[in-house]
Amino acid sequence: MLKEAFENRVVEHNINLEDFPESFGEVSIFFISDVHRRKIDEKILNKVKGKVDIVIIGGDLTEKKVPLSRVKENIAKLKTLGPVYFVWGNNDYEIDYHELDATLLENGVKILDNTAVTFESEKEDKFVLLGVDEISEGRDRLDLALSDAGAGGFRVLVCHNPKIMEQVKPEYRISLVLSGHTHGGQIRILGFGPYQKGGISRVHNTTVLVSNGYGTTALPLRLGAPSETHLIKLKQQI
């Protein structure tokens, strides 16, 4: 159980989608969620260094009693991979979130709090990254993120809590959703746990990735839902 809790796995996903703009070629995302108390291991960085276009932190970068120095150290490590984007998780609000907000901004992390950022190719195709704030805190405003995204573009939505899928409608044209929060159940007995094991699924026309997460909550133990991070390679389906 300790081994599973402190593994340094990078799960690679090749996701080919019809609506992905060909002019972007391939976009590689390093996705990490639910760091909590862990120090990000150099083994993780070495596995993906040079292969990443953008880094996304899917919430719960920290929690109560974690020193801010550790958060800064983890951010510095992730920044060696590429530009870093962040959405809030429920445990991030256990600390002085104004202080965390300032720390993220001072260290060059772009916070997606019901906002969106748009990347444009030479052919003027758009890749839009939307981020929604924490649902359990009542801070989620998908409508604001959609408004900020504007019209058109290939859309990736990041929200810590996978319950965001209850709000996603086909007309929003969101192609990919990235979430964490559930830890894959963290401790699964005979294959059963309080939440589904992390993985990829399809909901209508949306691909949904829910991560087991990198850290743990409560007990530093896992069973049947090992720690994981993700290297996601997006490409047009031929």
Image (tube, rainbow, N blue to C red):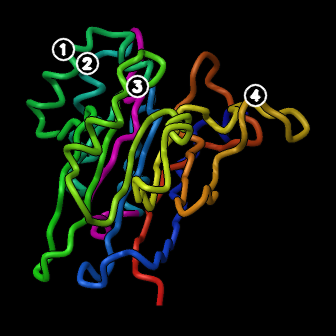
The residue under the point 47% across, 75% down is 17
Where residue 194 appears, x then y in whole percent? 75, 28
User: Is 56 inside the magenta-drawn segment?
Assistant: yes
Q: Nearer the viewer, mark 4 or mark 2?
A: 4
Q: Is residue 89 above or below residue 121?
A: above
Report, in whole angstroms, how far the alpha carbon at label 2 lies from the one at label 3. 20 Å
Q: Secondary structure at mark 4?
A: loop
Q: Which residue is mark 4?
A: 194
Q: Secondary structure at mark 2?
A: helix
**Type of the residue with mark 1:** Glu
- Magenta span covers which residues? 48-65
Report, in whole angstroms, how far the alpha carbon at label 1 lies from the one at label 3. 17 Å
Q: Which residue is mark 3?
A: 134
The numbered mark, 4 or 3, whose residue comes first in the sequence reads: 3
Q: Residues within 10 Å of mark 1 (few under 14, many from 20)?
A: few
Taking depth in this image into account, of 94 and 176 the one nearest to the observer is: 176
The numbered mark, 1 or 2, whose residue comes first in the sequence reads: 2
